[in-house]
Amino acid sequence: MSDSMDRLLLSNVSATTIAGDNFVIGGGRTDSGLFNGSAVGNGTSICTNVTTSNNITFSVTDIANCTVASLFPSSSSESHRLFEFIINGFGITIVAILGIIGNILSAVVLSRPQMRSSVTCLLLGLAFCDSLLVFTSALIFGLFSLSDFMGTLTTYRLVYHPLLVPYLYPISISAQTASVYLTLAVTLERYVAVCHPLRARSLCTWRRARYCVMTVLLFAITYNLPRWWEVLIVEGYNWTYNITMFENSMSEMRANPYYITIYINWAYLVVMYMVPFTGLVAFNLAIYRQAINLIVSFDARIHYVKSRPHLGIARLTANLVQCPTPL
């Protein structure tokens, strides 16, 4: 999600500025980093004062070259746009629609009174987080790529999408974090139920599961609080469409190399990959070993009864006498 957002911030300006359009922008991002200042074009005016974070200044005298698309030749290529349309536009949108429908149906079934248990509570929380994730991803990447490739929903692409991204991005990545750890919580619940069945009745309750879901949501929101200050909104004007347009760029905090190294790279690797993956492997291995032990023990009992049929019949008769069938 974080890498996809970086690519979106890199290509957002070029996607919302059509080659040859007359425009005014106040900032954006290049391959060298963030740029500030202004870029103004009216068909004949000079475009200047576009300075990157590495102090590289662009001075272009032709409005066709003043478009940001010319600063991102790889981002504006037809093959790249087609790839973004297929993967982000078509793929994410279809997955989001099917995923939301499936999660709604699952929530309806799991919400029945007879299905009330600790694992169903965790699964309901997981369905909510997954639905929120795919919904926000469709708004951030899906509709944007469809609009860019098909030339539709121009108002959404130029106005509403840049205004929504600074809020949808932290919500989506918080939902992603919660989804990962709720999956780990479901595995932990199954581990307790299989490997410690005598303690499962007291530990795996609906109330404890609700506390677990709330704790995971609180952790996901707290851990991703810096995401709210990563994306900026830049206001501009599109003379072709005669509307005020907006664009997104990275904040100074997001461009800080220490922030990228510590929080974006290492913390994301540990929190989103190493910890949940290690937990999933450990708990599933324990469940697998317990299942194998139960199978071996059951086979041994069956073999014992078959080798001593008179003892097996005697035990069966004793059990029937001690535990008669109720009328």
Image (spheres, rainbow, N blue to C red):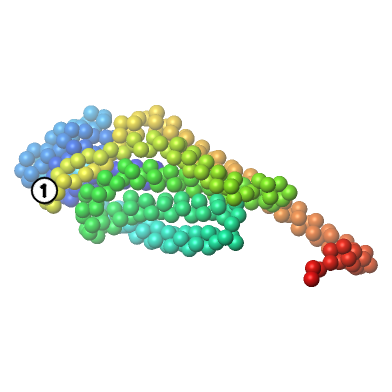
Q: Quadrant of residue 264?
A: top left
Q: Residue furthest bottom?
A: 327
Residue appearing at x 21%, y 55% in the figure: 154
Locate residue 300, reporting x and y percent: 83, 59
Q: Check disc 1 and report the residue beneath it.
A: 239
Q: Residue furthest right?
A: 310
Q: Is residue 34 left or right of residue 306?
A: left
Task: Please say if 257 is above or below 175.
Answer: above
Q: Kindly identify the amino acid type of the residue bearing the numbered disc 1.
A: Trp
Task: Please say if 253 is above or below 70.
Answer: above
Choose between 134 and 292: the one closer to the eye.
134
Locate residue 73, reporting x and y percent: 24, 46
Q: Residue furthest left?
A: 44
Locate residue 185, reporting x and y percent: 57, 47
Label 1: which secondary element: loop
Residue appearing at x 42%, y 38% in the figure: 224
Q: Residues within 10 Å of mark 1 (few under 14, many from 20)?
A: some
